[in-house]
Image (spheres, rainbow, N blue to C red):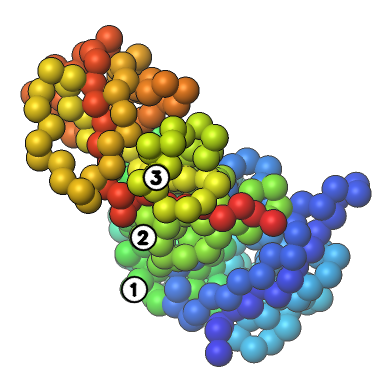
Amino acid sequence: MSYIHIDTVRKTYEAQMVLKDIDFKIEEGEFLTMLGPSGCGKSTLLRAIAGLIPIDSGSIIVGGRNITHLSPKERQVGMVFQSYALFPNMSVFENIAFGLKMEKMTKRDYTPLVEEMIALIDLRGKENQYPAQLSGGQQQRVALARALVKRPKVLLLDEPLSALDAKIRRHLRHQIRDIQRKLKMTTIFVTHDQEEALTISDRIVVMNNGVMEQQGTPAEIYTAPATEFVAKFIGSYNVWRKEELSKSQLAQMPSGELYAVRPESIRIVPAEEEDGLFDATWMRLGEGRVERSMILGNVMRYFIRVQAMQVIVDRLHDQDTRRVGEGTNVRLFLPVEDCRVLNALA
């Protein structure tokens, strides 16, 4: 039996459906990420789980208990918001202890719990500092500790890293994952960042316009997108319609109406070079011209025009790729098995 069941949840704002029969399950101790663009409904669903907004229909089950109509206090759910919401006039220790004090715990009882959290988030020595004296990453860890110290059954994280710069963000997301694993805390994480979701999640739920487009492990979501939206949102897939392809290309592809191909699957061969390395397991996409290229860290991305199609190709950024310059005529090859037929979302 799953630990959490989001059971056909619906939510409407001013006659607009923002959550449309969302239904998925989470195992105890699992780290699940809800991924999607701004306005897709992921934060609305998180707030519904926390009890901060009511739902129109459906139910939310945690540990076998229906919490749909319980108050936030009764749900035993901890939430960390995008804004840290720390009390500026309280020290690190006092901010973390705040919820326990509200439950009438004595300082003698809550002090060891708070100290344990301070050690867990690696802020020993900063117990008496105030939020203004901390970096953004340190403030976020204090907000996380404040949620964890009450030992909630479920931890909800609403884009907690979006205000941080890229380097701190990458470091802190791994810290959050390490803490989650140590505590074996069932966690739901909301983000619009694909890389973030792919690197830290056990499973991902991809949302768009209030609909759950796909759910699965990071590998399943990346290698086997189910819809056009997921293919374009995760990994910059090439997505081509049947009518964009030539008869010779279609003859080699699996039967379908919509096709998705990862940019790194496609091979570039300058027009003047031999292509004898490609056997029958490779499909020839055709000849084209490099219109544009850009460096994405250790990857070089090419935009190549092949008749009516624009093809995106990613290759490791090394000495070999630099010679395929803009304006170069090239031939493109693709492993037949890497061409995926997409299912249209009903």
Q: CA distance from mark 3 to mark 2?
A: 29 Å
Which residue corresponds to the image point at 55% horizontal and 47% vertical from the top-left?
257
Mark 1 — residue?
Answer: 182
Q: What element does badge 3 sit on?
A: helix
Which residue corresponds to the image point at 39% horizontal and 75% vertical from the top-left?
183
Which residue corresponds to the image point at 33% horizontal and 38% vertical from the top-left?
263
Inspect this view and state whether residue 297 appears. no
Q: Nearer the viewer, residue 178 or 284?
A: 284
Could you tell me residue 155's position as x and y percent?
Answer: 54, 67
Inspect this view and state whether residue 248 appears. yes
- Mark 2 surroundings within 10 Å by alpha-carbon count, few (fewer than 14), some (14 through 19), many (20 or more): few
Could you tell me residue 327's position as x and y percent?
Answer: 27, 9
Task: Check disc 3 and give the amino acid type.
Answer: Ala
Q: Earlier in the sequence, mark 1 or mark 3?
A: 1
Q: Would residue 14 be found to the left or right of residue 165 on screen?
A: right
Asked if residue 264 is positioned above or below residue 77 in the image, the reply reads above
Picture quarter with the N terminus: bottom right
Disc nearest the viewer among 1 and 3: 3
Disc nearest the viewer among 3 and 2: 3
Task: Check disc 2 and give the amino acid type.
Answer: Ala
Q: CA distance from mark 1 to mark 3?
A: 52 Å
Mark 2 — residue?
Answer: 219
Mark 3 — residue?
Answer: 251
Asked if residue 248 is positioned above or below residue 274 in the image, the reply reads below
Q: Earlier in the sequence, mark 2 or mark 1?
A: 1
- Mark 3 surroundings within 10 Å by alpha-carbon count, few (fewer than 14), some (14 through 19), many (20 or more): few
Do the residues under discs 2 and 1 have CB atoms within 8 angstroms? no
Q: Nearer the viewer, residue 176 or 112?
A: 176
Q: Would residue 17 be found to the left or right of residue 171 on screen?
A: right
